[in-house]
Image (cartoon, helix red, strand yellow):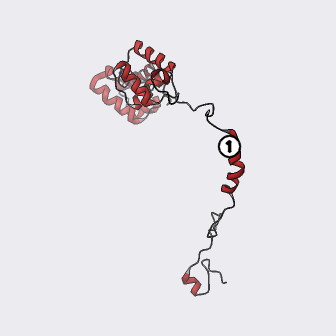
Amino acid sequence: MRYADGGGLTTAGRAKREAVRFEAAGMFGQGVRPPEVARRLRVSRKSAYAWHTAWRAGGRAALMSKGAGGLPCRLSDAQAERLQAGLEAGPAAHGWSEDQRWTLARVAELINRHFGYRYTPRGVSYLLHRLGWSPQVPARRAAERDEQAVAAWRTEQWSRVRGQRSSWALGSSSRTRPDRTWNPARAARGRDADGLRW
């Protein structure tokens, strides 16, 4: 099951699942057993038994959707808009001049400075995702990159580093026939590890 971008089910998804549970409640009322309900509704038996238990304890009302999961966002809509504007201004506008990247720690500190709320990195990640931000890899290379130095390293150093494979022992690249290893007991009898005379 694929969840909505904000995590969890959308309102429409929750309503759809609630309708399936209500259909199960109707079947339970007609005396249909949970395994048959699971087969008809194409759900797991575990879900059908859980719904049956809840239905027996509280009727159809016990199968109603409880709404979105998780804690509500601590930031109000106005605060979320202010955070969005602050993020768009960039890290330099808030005192981070080393580089122009928003990290989870920086955003958490920004939230704490402006709104007084402490967020964990995971909580910041969820909040940013909800606001439409996503992790990105820079599209451009670093401004400090020296293309001539990189090309020189590739021609001069890489060929030397790559070089020929050197090994103190011969190996085997076959999965079905490993390399021959020396076995002192067999060598004493005049045979190698594979039982061949030498």
Residue 73 vertical position relative to residue 144 in the rendered view, above or below: above
Q: Residue at x 45, y 22 (%)?
A: 94
Whole-percent x and y of residue 41? 46, 28
Whole-percent x and y of residue 20? 43, 24
Identify the image quadrant of residue 36: top left
Q: Residue at x 50, y 18 (%)?
A: 89
> Extreme right residue here?
155
Dot 1, crowdedness within 10 Å: few (<14), some or many (≥20)? few
Residue 102 vs residue 49, the one in the foreground: 102
**Quarter occupied by the C terminus:** bottom right
Q: Secondary structure at mark 1?
A: helix
The reply, left or right, for residue 49 in relation to residue 126 is left
The reply, left or right, for residue 42 in relation to residue 170 is left
Residue bearing mark 1: 149
Q: Residue at x 33, y 21 (%)?
A: 116
Whole-percent x and y of residue 78? 41, 12
**Residue type of the residue flagged with mark 1:** Ala
Identify the image quadrant of residue 115: top left
> Extreme left residue here?
57
Identify the image quadrant of residue 64: top left
Q: How many marks?
A: 1
Residue 69 vs residue 22, the one in the foreground: 69
> Extreme top residue here?
78
